[in-house]
Image: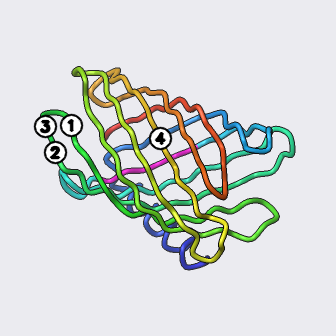
Amino acid sequence: MKFIFTLFILLATATAAQADSINFQLGDQTNSNGTSSNVYTIKYIHDVNKNLDVGVMINNSRNTSTEGVVSLYEISTRYKIPVVNKTAIYIGPTLGSLQPSGVDSRNYVGLEFGAMTKITDRIGLRADYTKMTGINVDTMDNTYSRIWASYDLTKKNTIGIRRDFMRGDLEFDTWSLMFQHRF
């Protein structure tokens, strides 16, 4: 766990200094036990080249009933393959650590794949699917699906809405608002 956290901090520091974009998300999560959580996410994305990027994410949620806090740290990379004009598919590994308050960390590895397209010069659509499994636990076998729509306010700023579905050992649904700034 300390190795993953140290690696995360090193990559976050390096990526933050050279990030090609930064994403902020605020969301409302409905948990499988009927409670809800407020979710906050920051993700730095660095484009290594036009087909490869590396992302570092910090996600925190606070359960509105129990006041329990869950922190998530994730490193990911995506290899993008252009399909047709303004459309690409991508695939890449993820490595993460879920850290609920008062409980041991749950580390995981996953494989994400998805597609993104621009349906106009300003409107984008994206869908992702990640299959993950626990590294140090038997309770992180999950699938994580995300769909979103975005609108480019300017060439550097984008807003969007996103819907997440986690199924498996952990289950929740989340609605999020997103803001992205490109450097």
Q: Amino acid at mark 4?
A: Arg
SS type, badge 1? strand
* Amino acid type indicated by mark 1: Thr
Left or right: residue 20 versus residue 58 is left
Q: Are marks 1 and 2 in contact (CB under 8 Å)?
A: yes
According to the picture, the residue beneath numbered tag 1 turns out to be 87
Rendered location of residue 118, percent (x, y)? 25, 28
Q: In whole angstroms, how far apart are the C-alphas of marks 3 and 2?
A: 6 Å
| Amino acid type, label 2 | Pro
- Which span is picked out in magenta? 41-46
Callout 3–callout 4 Cβ contact below 8 Å? no
- Residue beneath label 2, please? 82
x and y, in percent, of residue 122 in the image: 28, 21
Residue 2: within the magenta? Answer: no
| Of pointers 3 and 4, the one earlier in the residue sequence | 3
Q: Residue at x 74, y 71 (%)?
A: 104
Question: For this view, does 55 lie left or right of residue 85?
Answer: right
Please say whether residue 42 is one of the residues in the magenta stretch.
Answer: yes
